[in-house]
């Protein structure tokens, strides 16, 4: 008979101590993310999580451990989520509830991973199940991949691994490091200590030291326009057009550029009511193509969050409709259920909401090449970028990060945009209403930018794309299949393993 795992069962008091340390570890790990960017702390969190999990043998206790760790991590990482509630004074009271429920919701995925590892009854199973939980978080219920542990490595050599294995492969590698060295903590030896030190140094080495800067000589130039419209003023009839006039001035400014990019919902009216504005944009741009964000009414009567490309006369030549729309931001999921239980104020919050676009689409910018447009939230998802019908020459993100506040949210959103550039080996032109607008190289480097909460524009050369990366060819399917196979194998062995008397 195979003996059970040689770990003590926890008493209730020991469990509470474990949960307290898990909460602290999660909070500490959150400070690895922007704007704090202490990358070593994500390693500390992973190491602590695996060490704490070693002494847990009950599934419920493991789930509580994962939930507590996740809550501590996400309540700090997602603290910016209170900002949208503060735009309207009538919704301020909802802010703490929104943050707590979001942190708990994200923590539930980690609870599932920790519970699953205990059920599989393999000491290394958490490597698989935690990675699988993060993958599910990116896909399930339309997904919300914000703040993943690999996001903390975007400025470091470890972040360059995104080009080979993607975000979930990097998560797997972090889990392997956490497990291997947590197993050696109780019997620390010099060799293991040196190995841990070297691995951490390599992972956290600044990427700029070792990755080549993209070639930008004799490349097309893109103007990134940042009007800096606070969300409370963006749609106000007394102030909204001030920001449009500001963007027009930036568009007409001297300079030899090949493309001018305005951010998401740059014009505070529907497209069919904005012919005069579009004409003014065309005149300001002259012979230069302008792409901007605007809302439009589709043939089915639904609103679309769109990006349109304009010629010199202000005529729309190409249109892209956002297809990965934000739950509780651009539509209410399960609206019928909220109305059925009498919560009509929730179900009717956005009326019929926004319609989904048809999916990823390439836009042709002539000599610049073809671009994959991403509107705001869509840059959070590696698989949305990988869903392009063909490989683009560059990526475009237009966004209104005024919703995310003026501290952590916009900086974390920029970090995710940089992840997408690394994963695909493609440059990204990013125009953000309040910032941070940036030209991002194919290694994730910031080539030029306009600072957060600053009005202005920047003319930046568009780097050449790299050769297709391994991850751009494989996506998440191979790793997902391996993780599922490992889970099934563990379940099979667990079913055959006799239980201890």
Image (cartoon, rainbow, N blue to C red):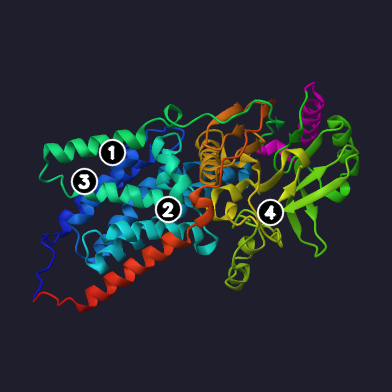
Say what secondary structure mark 2 lies in: helix
Q: Position of residue 218 (x, y in %)?
A: 69, 26
Return the residue found at the far front. Answer: 467
The residue tagged 3 is 181
Return the residue found at the far top. Answer: 254
Which residue: 80% across, 21% down?
Answer: 254
Distance, label 4 to label 1, CA atoms, is 40 Å
Which residue: 87% across, 50% down?
Answer: 272
Nearest to N terminus: mark 2 or mark 3: 2
Q: Is residue 291 above or below residue 123?
A: above
Distance, label 4 to label 3, CA atoms, is 43 Å
**Residue 483 or residue 366, whichever sits in front:** 366
**Which circle marks residue 168 in the picture?**
2
The residue tagged 4 is 322
Q: Main secondary structure of the magenta part?
A: helix
The residue tagged 1 is 199
- Foreground: disc 4 or disc 3: 3
Q: Is residue 142 above or below residue 89?
A: below
Specify the segment rendered in magenta: 231-255
Q: Quadrant of residue 9?
A: bottom left
Q: Are marks 2 and 3 in contact (CB under 8 Å)?
A: no
Nearest to N terminus: mark 4 or mark 3: 3
């Amino acid at each position: 008979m195979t003996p059970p795992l040689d770990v003590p069962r926890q008493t209730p008091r020991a469990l509470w101590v474990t949960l307290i340390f898990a909460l602290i570890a999660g909070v500490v790990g959150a400070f690895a993310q922007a704007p704090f960017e202490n990358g070593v702390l994500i390693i500390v969190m992973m190491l602590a999580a695996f060490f704490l999990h070693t002494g847990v043998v009950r599934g419920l206790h493991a789930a509580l451990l994962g939930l507590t760790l996740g809550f501590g991590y996400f309540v700090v990482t997602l603290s910016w989520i209170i900002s949208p509630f503060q735009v309207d004074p009538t919704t301020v009271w909802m802010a703490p509830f929104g943050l707590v429920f979001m942190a708990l919701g994200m923590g539930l995925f980690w609870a599932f991973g920790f519970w699953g590892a205990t059920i599989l009854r393999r000491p290394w199973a958490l490597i698989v199940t935690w990675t699988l939980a993060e993958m599910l978080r990116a896909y399930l219920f339309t997904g919300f991949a914000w703040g993943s542990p690999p996001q903390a490595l975007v400025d470091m050599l470890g972040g360059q691994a995104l080009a080979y294995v993607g975000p979930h492969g990097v998560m797997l590698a972090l889990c392997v490091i956490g497990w291997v060295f947590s197993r050696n903590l109780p019997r620390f030896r010099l060799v293991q200590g040196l190995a841990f030190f070297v691995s951490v140094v390599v992972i956290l080495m600044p990427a700029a030291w070792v990755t080549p800067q993209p070639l930008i000589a004799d490349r097309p130039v893109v103007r990134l326009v940042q009007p800096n419209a606070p969300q409370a003023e963006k749609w106000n009839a007394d102030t909204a057009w001030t920001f449009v006039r500001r963007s027009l001035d930036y568009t007409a400014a001297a300079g030899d550029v090949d493309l001018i990019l305005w951010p998401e919902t740059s014009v505070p009216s529907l497209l069919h009511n904005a012919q005069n504005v579009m004409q003014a944009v065309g005149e300001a741009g002259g012979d230069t193509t302008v792409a901007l964000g605007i809302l439009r009414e589709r043939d089915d009567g639904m609103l679309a969050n769109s990006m349109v490309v304009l010629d010199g006369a202000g005529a729309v030549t190409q249109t892209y409709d956002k297809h990965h729309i934000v739950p509780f931001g651009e539509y209410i999921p399960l609206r019928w259920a909220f109305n059925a239980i009498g919560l009509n104020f929730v179900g009717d919050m956005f009326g019929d909401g926004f319609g989904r676009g048809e999916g990823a689409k390439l836009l042709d910018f002539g000599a610049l090449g073809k671009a994959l447009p991403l509107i705001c939230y869509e840059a959070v998802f590696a698989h949305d970028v990988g869903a392009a019908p063909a490989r683009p020459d560059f990526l475009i993100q237009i966004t209104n990060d005024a919703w995310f506040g003026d501290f952590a949210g916009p900086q974390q959103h920029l970090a995710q945009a940089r992840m997408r550039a690394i994963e695909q080996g493609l440059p990204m032109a990013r125009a953000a209403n309040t910032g941070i607008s940036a030209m991002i190289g194919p290694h994730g480097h910031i080539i030029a930018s306009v600072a957060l909460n600053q009005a202005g524009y920047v003319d930046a050369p568009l780097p050449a794309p790299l050769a297709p990366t391994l991850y751009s060819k494989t996506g998440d399917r191979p790793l997902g299949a391996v993780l599922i196979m490992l889970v099934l194998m563990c379940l099979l062995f667990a079913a055959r393993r006799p239980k201890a008397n």
